[in-house]
């Protein structure tokens, strides 16, 4: 067990360093330590399942140790920005004001094809319209467009839309959710009145009914089974 | 911070459990190897009854620890140990001094191997 514990910690640290050296593009939406945990745990867990000669504790022990390592690493990274930079690295700016930073591209081993692919995934076809393209520490690329290329919003048109707020489900497949009804400050009488207005005699005839913070109601009656 | 302390505590308990396991396996395999050594000495003194009695008590002690060994030791190693016990006892039944001593040595070696696998050495870790 002591050997297993030591080996687990050594493998974890080695993988952490290896993944860190491989760069962010290998990760795709997982942080380094999370990826290692995901890869190692799935592999370790399968061993005693495939070979009954391996005691179950040989899998449970390293899994527990890895989880503790991950918890410790994520905790320390929250406390120390230096440690966070060491483990996860820093975001890299690949495009700045429409100009590709070739140095950052080389450093992150990113080819122009891959950058173009990432931009297309962000619905960007014209690099000159990109203010920043940032390679995040989890391998994801976030694109911030220049102000002139950003989509129009009601705010830019100075026409703020009505904000309905969060919709609360009141009837779910014929079942009344009384807690939600109380939450919006209404009662059963109000609900029956609203149902009658919409031609439904009972809640069981309603498939879905929701009310948002502004009081707007979405209503759908139950369809008959075909 | 609580979570991290909890994780550190678990990691520390895993290390403590590993240390306990190492001591326990050392004492168990050492005890059994000691009894087998005594049994092998009895063979050399031509005291076959005592040798058999000691061998059986060593096997009994090993079997009594099955709850622990089955959980913590690879089952292939347990099979090898059981086979070594079987070989030694069959040599004792045959009353063949050379074969019995060799089988006792193999059994003691197997006990050492089980301990060595758990002991922290450069060989076992890497």
Image (spheres, grey):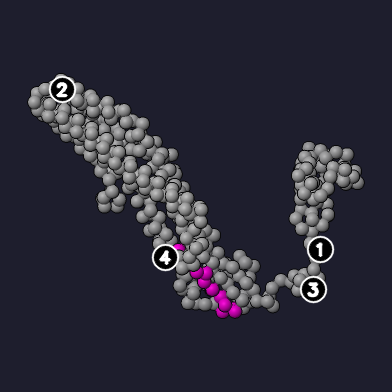
Discs 4 and 2 carry the same chain letter:
no
Label 3 resides on the chain identified as A
- First to last magenta residue range: A87-99
Q: Disc 3 designates what residue?
A: A158
Q: Nearer the viewer, residue A110 or B33?
A: B33
Q: Secondary structure at mark 2?
A: helix
Residue A110 sits above or below residue B90 on the image: below
How far, Cα to Cα, is label 4 from label 1? 49 Å
Q: Earlier in the sequence, mark 4 or mark 1?
A: 4
Q: Disc 1 designates what residue?
A: A162
How far, Cα to Cα, is label 3 from label 1? 13 Å
Q: How many marks?
A: 4
Label 3 environment density (alpha carbons within 10 Å; few <14, some 14–19, many ≥20)? few
Q: Position of residue A225 (x, y in %)?
A: 78, 37
At a point 84% along the width and 42% down the height, the residue shown is A188
Q: Disc 4 designates what residue?
A: A21
CB atoms at circles 4 and 1 under 8 Å apart?
no
């Amino acid at each position: 067990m002591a050997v297993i514990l030591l080996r687990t910690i050594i493998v974890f640290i080695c993988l952490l360093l290896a993944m860190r050296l491989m760069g962010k593009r290998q990760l795709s939406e997982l942080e380094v330590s999370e990826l290692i945990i995901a890869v190692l745990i799935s592999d370790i867990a399968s061993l005693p399942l495939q070979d009954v000669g391996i005691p179950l504790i040989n899998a449970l022990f390293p899994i527990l140790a890895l989880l503790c390592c991950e918890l410790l690493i994520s905790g320390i990274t929250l406390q120390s920005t230096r440690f966070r930079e060491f483990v996860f690295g820093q975001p890299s700016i690949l495009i700045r004001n429409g100009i590709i930073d070739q140095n950052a591209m080389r450093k992150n081993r990113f080819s122009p094809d891959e950058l173009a692919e990432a931009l297309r995934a962000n619905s960007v076809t014209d690099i000159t319209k990109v203010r920043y393209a940032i390679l995040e520490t989890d391998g994801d690329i976030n694109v911030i467009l220049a102000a002139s290329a950003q989509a129009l919003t009601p705010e830019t048109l100075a026409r703020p839309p009505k904000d309905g707020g969060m919709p609360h489900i009141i009837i779910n497949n014929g079942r009344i959710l009384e807690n939600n009804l109380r939450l919006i400050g209404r009662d059963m009488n109000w609900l029956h009145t609203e149902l009658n207005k919409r031609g439904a005699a009972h809640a069981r005839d309603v498939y879905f009914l929701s009310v948002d913070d502004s009081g707007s109601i979405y209503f759908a009656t139950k369809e008959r089974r075909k | 911070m609580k979570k991290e302390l909890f994780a550190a505590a678990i990691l520390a308990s895993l290390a403590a459990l590993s240390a306990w396991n190492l001591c326990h396996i050392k004492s168990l395999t050492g005890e059994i190897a000691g009894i087998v050594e005594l049994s092998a000495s009895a063979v050399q003194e031509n005291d076959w009854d005592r040798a058999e009695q000691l061998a059986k008590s060593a096997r009994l002690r090993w079997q009594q620890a099955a709850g622990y060994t089955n959980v913590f030791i690879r089952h292939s190693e347990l099979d090898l140990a059981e086979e070594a016990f079987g070989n030694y006892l069959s040599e004792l039944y045959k009353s063949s001094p050379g074969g019995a001593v060799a089988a006792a040595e193999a059994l003691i070696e197997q006990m050492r191997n089980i301990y060595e696998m758990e002991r922290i050495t450069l060989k076992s870790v890497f």
